[in-house]
Amino acid sequence: MQISLINSQKDEAGLNIARQFDELIDQKRIAAHDRITPTADFQLVEVGERLIYQDGIDQSVDTDLIIFLSRHTSKHSLPLLTVHAPGNIGVADLGGKPNSIPPTSPTWMKAVFNNLLQYAPQKYKVTYEVTHHGPTELDTPSFFVEIGSTHSEWIDPAAGRAVAQSIFEAVPRDSIHLLGLGGNHYASRVTKIAKESRAAFGHIIHTRDLPLLDSRLITTLRDRSGAVAAYIDRNSVPNDSASRIEGLLTTINLSTIGERELVSIGDLRFETFIAIIHLAQEISSKSHPIVHHLTGEGDLSIVTVDANLLIEALRSNAKKVRKGIENLPLAHLTTTDGSILPKFITFERYRSKLINDLINLCVKIIIGYQKTSIDGDFLFIHKLQFDPAKARKLGIPMGPLYGMLSSGQSVEVDGRVITPAMVHTECTKILYIPGLERYV
């Protein structure tokens, strides 16, 4: 793969990065990197004018990818290392043409971003930026890597070295190409998600520009990002705007995906994850799948455990149940209130063992945290429950005293001390678990 690193003679940050990169690839001067083999052939290209005006430069440069090396300017004067795609939503104040979106490379941009997180000098923050400025008239994928935000950072050799090294050592990984919709200029939610997941964002649109999107433009954004789904930053997008955007996405058959789903997907193939989402919707339209330890692909299967067994385990120690589930190869389903459904999704090859593991998990937690007894395949759970009838017989008035006794506190009524044991009745819940002896 041929990658062109383009900088401008008028851009001190670009000159800094190019100089550092040139030194980096000089094998006599990078003994520390002898074992590193670049994943592409790089060429440095310098132009006289500003990068934002380089429309059509790919017609004169034989390349598969363009990385523009540039400065970032901000009134906040923060030390930054940033990545972003070029493009104009609406007017073209800084190069390019209005409403023009060039292709970008989410995978390579993420690979460089990940390295920036590792190599950035201590005072520098690493972030994505939304799509903005030119050049826009390009047929070759491109993106910017920038040093910000003032002259002292632009000429900082440590910052230049960090960017150069991040590009030189970039290794594209299996990622999920996404279109980002909403957020501030520095795309804070997108940046956070990219750090924590396989999400690789291409074009990212500022909240203020969302009203400018129509079906043609959003189709172009999807195609020029190679997006398989869209992420909407719902914390920064008004509900009516989000609804309109979702309608546009539906018309172009592009689904939305949330932060929680992106973080939970792990190494699972994206196509398989989408199939899990659809299967979860068939189980319950209000369910939400969270994936644990599923990788690759396979035939999906639904595993069901007895609802009462799961409920009693959660009542016994919900934290341990959730922790145990997280260590199994499955997707568990939650409802809008956070409840766990008794149906789990897994690969068919895990089905038999998973049924046993889930039952074993629930039984051991119930036995460990509740008073129980066993007879054959029957698990008896013995509980003490507050009995209002007993409380009334003892002359205890309804109200706060009931709550105190129910929670295990003794109370005083007319000089008498009433203990919880005096107003509780033992009840027994019976669970039928075939082969129970295997789990105890």
Image: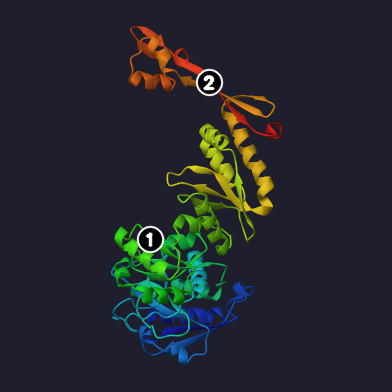
Residue 342 on image: x %, y %: 55, 42
Residue 300 on image: x %, y %: 62, 55
Say which of 225 and 197 sits in front: 225
Say which of 131 and 46 sits in front: 131
**Can residue 174 be seen in the rendering of this structure?**
yes
- Furthest-bottom residue in view? 60
Left or right relative to 414: residue 191: right
Q: Amino acid at mark 2?
A: Cys
- Location of the C terminus by quadrant is top right
* Contact between labelled residues 2 and 1, with CB atoms less than 8 Å apart: no
Of tags 1 and 2, which is closer to the observer? 2
Q: Is residue 236 above or below residue 105?
A: above
**Can residue 128 be seen in the rendering of this structure?**
no
**Which of disc 2 and disc 1 is earlier in sequence?**
1
Residue labelled with disc 2:
427
Residue labelled with disc 1:
233
Q: Is residue 366 above or below residue 305?
A: above
Say which of 256 and 13 sits in front: 256
At x 48%, y 49%, the residue is: 287
> SS for tag 1?
loop
- Rendering quarter of residue 31: bottom right
- Furthest-front residue in view? 282
> SS for tag 2?
strand
The disc placed on residue 131 is none
- Rendering quarter of residue 77: bottom left
Residue 417 on image: x %, y %: 40, 10
Q: Amino acid at mark 1?
A: Asp
